[in-house]
Image: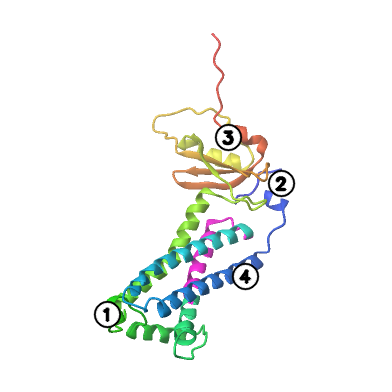
Amino acid sequence: MTDPAPGQVPIATLSPQPKVAAVIARHAAGLLLLTAGYEFLLVGFETYAYGLSRRSSYLIFSNVFLVIFLIHAVFRLIRVTIRRARILRPEGWMSLSIISGVLAIYWGWSVDRWLRLGLFGVGNAGLSLSPVALADYLTQFHDKGLWGWGNSWYFDHDTVRGDWLVLWWLLESATILLVPSAMTWRFLRHHPQCVQCGSWMEMNLNVRRMQSSRAARVQEGLREGDFSVLEEPDRPQKGDPFTLRIDLCRCEVCPAAVYLCLTHDRSILLWMHPIPSSQVQKVFKPIRKAKSN
């Protein structure tokens, strides 16, 4: 977020800052619990339900619904964490999303190994986070396969393995890693967060457009708290497109919390810049008085 205008009280100081470490710890615990539940259902169905008959083996394709449930749950968890920790920068959003995806994939494989070779299997494997143990498990899984579908699975116990299994793993991993991140980015583009209370806000796009040549002057004025640059009338000139855009956000919980975003040719010049509520009317294009005859 940009610095407040001179003489303006920073909105971020009006409320106590959250304990980010505690919020992130709860996020990690929730993520591990969600992923473990997903793996428990996935391995349980593949072990005890999908192999009951030839027809039931085709239900293995319903695993896609488990993946959809997981990515939606991870997305909601990321959104809650961003709100509680008040992570305001896009770099923070994406870092949290990517790290969450990597953690979910690694933890998921660790739980998968324990369930297939321990709890639901014939082995005595315990839960291990060792990369070596996980690599050995993936190699064994790749070479022999542990699940299948259709007649070949039910009658001959022919498993899916090799390149086809790798393709399935890549699709599943890419979905868990990238889809929640894309959903988070899409949501936060249109719902910025209020620094004061943490509420989501609606972004009002295209509140005003101005000429491209005024970008530097308007940006400098707003940074210095000079809102008179917005009251200057627009004078359209040939070859000077209206590509300087102002968007506004107002928090419904905090009446005094108003934020301005300034974008020029898809480049963000100001993001969530706090402005006094008394200056909001200057953002809108001034109306010239009609000349008297």
Is residue 116 positioned above or below 222 on the image? below
Earlier-in-chain disc, 1 versus 2: 2
State the image coordinates of residue 238 (x, y, percent, origin top left): 39, 29
Q: Which of 282 and 224 lies nearest the eye of the viewer?
A: 282
Earlier-in-chain disc, 4 versus 2: 2
The CA span between labels 3 and 2 is 20 Å
Q: Which of 273 and 159 lies nearest the eye of the viewer?
A: 159
- Graded by Cα atoms within 10 Å as few (under 14), some (14 to 19) or many (20 or more), the crowding at tag 3 reads some
- Which residue in the protein does label 2 denote? 9
Residue 106 in the figure: left or right of residue 57: right
The CA span between labels 4 and 3 is 41 Å
Q: Kindly report which numbered mark, 3 or 1, lies closer to the viewer in this rendering.
A: 1
Residue contact at pointers 4 and 2, CB within 8 angstroms: no
- Which residue in the protein does label 3 denote? 283
Q: Amino acid at mark 2?
A: Val
Is residue 122 positioned above or below 240 on the image? below
Residue contact at pointers 1 and 2, CB within 8 angstroms: no
The CA span between labels 1 and 2 is 70 Å
Q: Kindly report which numbered mark, 4 or 1, lies closer to the viewer in this rendering.
A: 1
The CA span between labels 3 and 1 is 68 Å
Question: Residue visible at 29% across and 75% down?
Answer: 150
Indicate the quadrant containing the C terminus: top left, top right, bottom left or bottom right.
top right
Q: Amino acid at mark 1?
A: Ser
- Graded by Cα atoms within 10 Å as few (under 14), some (14 to 19) or many (20 or more), the crowding at tag 2 reads few
- Which residue in the protein does label 4 denote? 25
- Which residue in the protein does label 1 denote? 152
Question: Residue visible at 47% across and 57% down?
Answer: 183
Using the rendered view, name the quadrant where residue 44 is placed: bottom left
Earlier-in-chain disc, 4 versus 1: 4
